[in-house]
């Protein structure tokens, strides 16, 4: 699927999808849920969350 096609499906700019793919953008919950819906999966399966954030918040 092209970045532009995915962007159209979730109502964002193509550049946003590119930045997501490169790990340069953290999506909103709404965008994460929309992307998971498009791919027929869960947010947890689509995105990985590293432990670095958990260590900082403790």
Image (cartoon, helix red, strand yellow):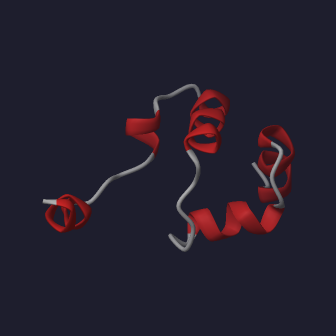
Q: Where residue 22 appears, x then y in whole percent?
A: 55, 72
- Quarter of the image containing the C terminus? bottom left
Residue occupying the point 75% across, 48% down: 1
Camera-side residue of 55 and 20: 55
> Is 44 situated left or right of 27 in this image?
left
Q: Where residue 5 appears, x then y in whole percent?
A: 84, 48
Which corner quadrant of the image does residue 30 belong to?
A: top right
Residue occupying the point 57% across, 54% down: 27
Camera-side residue of 54 and 38: 54
Position of 43 relative to 13 (above/below): above
Residue occupying the point 57% across, 67% down: 25
Q: Where residue 48 appears, x then y in whole percent?
A: 35, 52
Residue occupying the point 69% across, 68% down: 18
Count of labels in the image: 0
């Amino acid at each position: 699927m092209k970045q532009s096609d995915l962007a159209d499906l979730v109502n964002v700019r193509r550049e946003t999808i590119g930045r997501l793919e490169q790990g340069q953008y953290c999506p909103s919950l709404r965008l994460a849920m929309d992307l998971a819906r498009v791919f027929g999966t869960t947010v947890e399966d689509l995105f990985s969350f590293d432990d670095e954030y958990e260590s900082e918040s403790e």
